[in-house]
Image (tube, grey):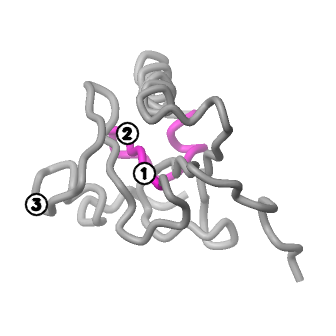
Amino acid sequence: MSTYEDNNIFAKILRGEIPCDKVYEDDYALAFNDINPQAPVHILVIPKGSYISIDDFGVNAPAEEVAGFYKAVANIVAEKELAGDGFRTIANTGLNGGQEVPHFHVHILGGAALGPMISKAV
């Protein structure tokens, strides 16, 4: 696994160096609207700690931080009233998983029928 890069865009957002359209924040997570939404609701949720990927987060974050992060995801889903009609959460990991920013993050997508999860790999 790579070393965490402190100059990635999400690290800069967490430090307040780059603005975001914030929708939620607590001690464990920051959430904001995606600048290139792929659904009517497309929110990115990032932990406040320095983790590269979901596996890095799961192995290295303290249990309190893991629980706090996923409770933040649940709070956002409730606030946006997404649970009734359904929503999708995605955590892209690594090159083959399509991860573009090397800071663990979850995409929450909803507000419409989203179709198939992925197209078949070639």
Q: Which residue shows up at 64% across the image and 30% down it?
A: 84
Relative placement, left or right, of 33 versus 60 is: left
Rendering coords of residue 109 (x, y %): 56, 51
The question of residue 51 being in magenta is answered with yes
| Other residues around mark 2 within 10 Å, as few (<14) / some (14–19) / many (≥20) | many
Rendering coords of residue 119 (x, y %): 83, 72
Q: Residue furthest bottom?
A: 122
Quadrant in the rendering for residue 102: bottom left
Q: Nearer the viewer, mark 1 or mark 2?
A: 1
First-in-chain label (3 vs 1): 3
Separation of disc 3 and disc 2 at Cα?
17 Å
Relative placement, left or right, of 92 versus 35 is: right
Amino acid identity at mark 2: Pro
Q: Which residues are magenta?
A: 42-58
Label 3–label 2 contact, CB within 8 A: no
- Compared to residue 66, the image places residue 80 above or below, namely below
The question of residue 98 being in magenta is answered with no
Front position in the image: 86 or 54:
86
Tag 3's secondary structure?
loop
| Other residues around mark 3 within 10 Å, as few (<14) / some (14–19) / many (≥20) | few
Amino acid identity at mark 1: Leu
Front position in the image: 40 or 29:
40
Relative placement, left or right, of 69 versus 95 is: left
Q: Quadrant of the C terminus?
A: bottom right
Look at mark 2 in the image and give the residue it sits on: 47
Tag 1's secondary structure?
strand
**Residue 120 numbered mark, or none:** none
Q: Which residue shows up at 21% across the image and 56% down it?
A: 13
Look at mark 3 in the image and give the residue it sits on: 17
Relative placement, left or right, of 54 versus 22 is: right
Look at mark 1 in the image and give the residue it sits on: 44
Q: Which residue shows up at 47% across the image and 50% down it?
A: 104
